[in-house]
Image (tube, helix red, strand yellow):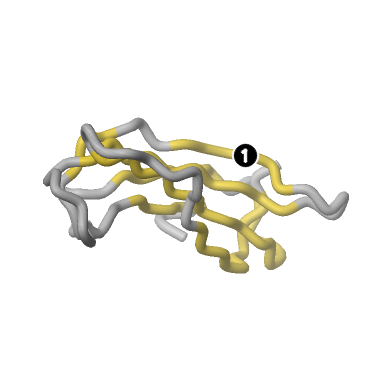
Amino acid sequence: MTGGDASGHGWWGKGNCKNDYADVYNCLYEYYTDGYWYKKACSPTKKLKPYGGSTWRTNARKKCNSESKLISWRNHVDVNVIDEPDTAEKPMNQAAIKCVAN
């Protein structure tokens, strides 16, 4: 939660990549009682250096309509390292927060 919004960040770790920049974006998903996850917000894609920090990350935010009950949220991050092969996985973190966005 950030200022009454559901909020998630995206960044990358260099690992064994040769390049120093990647295109990164992240999206927030809210869980519904029908058993599905619904996309609520995505950040713009940014060309980032590795390892995060407040200047080297993306941010997706969705305003909460209510903070009356705990709801599960997921943050998916997509990283495409410049001029290197890409794999399909999207790292995901999940948390229950008091935010209903509907």
Say which element carries label 1. strand
Q: Quadrant of residue 68?
A: bottom right
Which is more toward the observer, 1 or 36?
36
Q: Quadrant of residue 24?
A: top left
Residue 4 horizontal side relative to residue 65, left or right: left
Residue at the spot of label 1: 39
Which is more toward the observer, 47 or 9?
47
The residue at the far right in this view is 34
Q: Residue at x 35, y 51 (%)?
A: 10
Please say whether residue 54 is visible from this viewpoint. no
Q: Residue at x 26, y 38 (%)?
A: 84
Q: Residue at x 43, y 53 (%)?
A: 8
| 99 relative to 82, above or below | below
Q: In which quadrant is the C terminus drawn?
A: top right
Q: Residue at x 59, y 66 (%)?
A: 97
> Looking at the picture, which amino acid does disc 1 mark?
Lys
Residue 83, horizontal then vertical, whole percent = 22, 32
Residue 101 horizontal side relative to residue 75, left or right: right
Q: Total marks drawn?
A: 1
Residue 48 horizontal side relative to residue 61, left or right: left
Residue 49, horizontal then vertical, whole percent = 15, 47
Residue 61, horizontal then vertical, whole percent = 45, 44
